[in-house]
Image: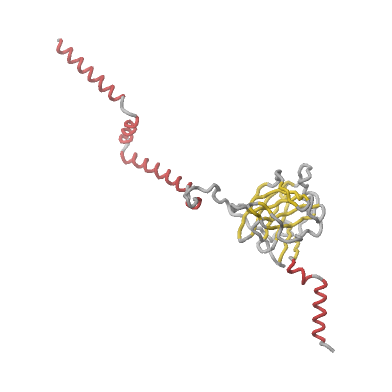
Amino acid sequence: MAERSRGARRRLLLLLLLLLAGSAASPAEEGGGRREAGGGEHGEDAARHHDSSYGTFASEFYDLRYLSEEGYPFPTAPPVDPFAKIRVDDCGKTKGCFRYGKPGCNAETCDYFLSYRRIGADVEFELSADTDGWVAVGFSSDKKMGGDDVMACVHDDNGRVRIQHFYNVGQWAKEIQRNPARDEEGVFENNRVTCRFKRPVYVPREETIVDLHLSWYYLFAWGPAIQGSITRHDIDSPPVSERVVSIYKYEDIFMPSAAYQTFSSPFCLLLIVALTFYLLMGTP
């Protein structure tokens, strides 16, 4: 009887030890056991899928195109959608345009190009110029620089084109922090700065921002930039619209650059006719 009781106690003690040993198993061992119980091949496939997903994410995030020579990511974001080319077929129809340069030039070949069109409560502007620095349009009450609201597209050292707001104080352009531009786009390609942006037709009355529903002379200018800051324009006397411009009237206006103005002046044409007549008639 006593021997049977001792045997029972030994079995009970052994059972308690087994229970304690089972509860002391580590979570990692339990996870491994469940993975095997669920099927070795399925568990291995899941692990491989996880590793592959992480590898794909890492390879996309650290795309070699966005790594510097040292292997660190550039601080700039990947490229966005390409800049939509400016359509000149719409000039004089659904938008107004100004072209300055060689006769027959377009937005990609003119020395300077500007277009404008109304879109709801905004006016969309497109600017392009043959420069690696900046291109701008000024809204003036006269044809002179000074006291003008100016919108400029500036190419900086990082390759970006930013839309900035300036106010002409005499012959000096002062940057204004309040920028009415929105939906900004810009690109620097083929040694040209090109941009597109919108600004409201109506704005609260302020000296540095004009209401575009009124008519203004348009000042056209472009030039170099140093570390993203504009410098003096390329030509001494930048072109100006011949008359005030209304955003409610679309025209396609061409202005010949200096290289083509000489032969288009009435005096030069008269001189050419006179010389031609003299050569045909001969000397007495």
**Residue 43 shows up from this direction:** yes
Question: Quick check: 147 left or right of 17?
Answer: right
Give the image quarter of residue 47.
top left
Give the image quarter of residue 238.
bottom right
Q: Residue at x 81, y 78 (%)?
A: 273
Q: Nearer the viewer, residue 139 or 41?
A: 139
**How does the figure colour the protein chain or chains?**
secondary structure
* Residue 227 spot, x, y in % from top left: 63, 52
Check the image and name the residue furthest to the right: 284
Q: Nearer the viewer, residue 234 or 194?
A: 234
* Residue 241 spot, x, y in % from top left: 78, 58
Q: Residue at x 40, y 45 (%)?
A: 52
How many tags in the picture?
0
Vertical side of 118 occupied by 91: above or below? below
Q: Quadrant of the N terminus?
A: top left
* Residue 223 spot, x, y in % from top left: 69, 58
**Residue 120 shows up from this direction:** no
* Residue 143 spot, x, y in % from top left: 81, 56
Check the image and name the residue furthest to the top: 1
Q: Nearer the viewer, residue 67 or 14?
A: 67
Q: Quadrant of the C terminus?
A: bottom right
Check the image and name the residue furthest to the bottom: 284
